[in-house]
Image: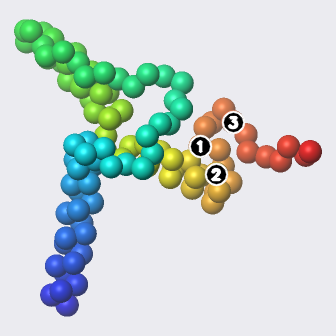
């Protein structure tokens, strides 16, 4: 039982640090997502206290776009929604047969 606990704890910790490892070493297998927008860029450091609130919001957008394994997770989500649940991952697209 102790070996199982050590194994599960190790796996859990690995899942927590994998995004950090991907941000450093870029090991994610998916490189492009074909999004119709540019990813958020790293914001410039705030020059005064008033700019801190805007900086935090911009940094959150940057972080959300550059989170480790984000592209892989989005692709897996699209695959699950399309192939398993037969739903489009995009609300504006319909899943169906071409009838051809």
Marking on residue 93 = 3
Residue with the most extreme right position? 100
Rendered position, 42 above or below 28: above
- Mark 1–mark 3 Cα distance, whole angstroms, equals 8 Å
| Residue under the point 7% across and 9% down | 48
Residue with the most extreme bottom position? 1
Image x and y of residue 19, in percent: 27, 49
Rendered position, 82 above or below 34: below
User: Dot 1 lies on which element?
Assistant: loop
- Mark 2–mark 1 Cα distance, whole angstroms, equals 7 Å
| Residue under the point 24% across and 66% down | 12
| Residue under the point 23% across and 18% down | 43
Is label 2 in contact with label 1 (beta carbons under 8 Å)?
A: yes
User: Dot 3 lies on which element?
Assistant: loop
Residue of label 1: 89
Of the image marks 3 and 2, the number of the one nearer the N terminus: 2
| Residue under the point 43% across and 40% down | 31
Is label 3 in contact with label 2 (beta carbons under 8 Å)?
A: no
Is label 1 in contact with label 3 (beta carbons under 8 Å)?
A: yes
Marking on residue 82 = 2
């Amino acid at each position: 039982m102790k070996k199982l606990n050590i194994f599960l704890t190790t796996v859990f910790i690995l899942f927590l640090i994998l995004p950090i490892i991907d941000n450093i070493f870029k090991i994610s297998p998916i490189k492009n997502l074909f999004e119709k927008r540019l990813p958020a860029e790293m914001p410039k450091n705030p020059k005064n206290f008033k700019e801190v609130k805007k900086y935090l919001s911009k940094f959150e957008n940057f972080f959300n776009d550059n989170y480790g394994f984000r592209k892989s997770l989005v692709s897996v989500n699209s695959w699950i929604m399309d192939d398993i649940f037969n739903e489009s991952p995009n609300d504006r697209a319909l899943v169906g047969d071409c009838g051809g």
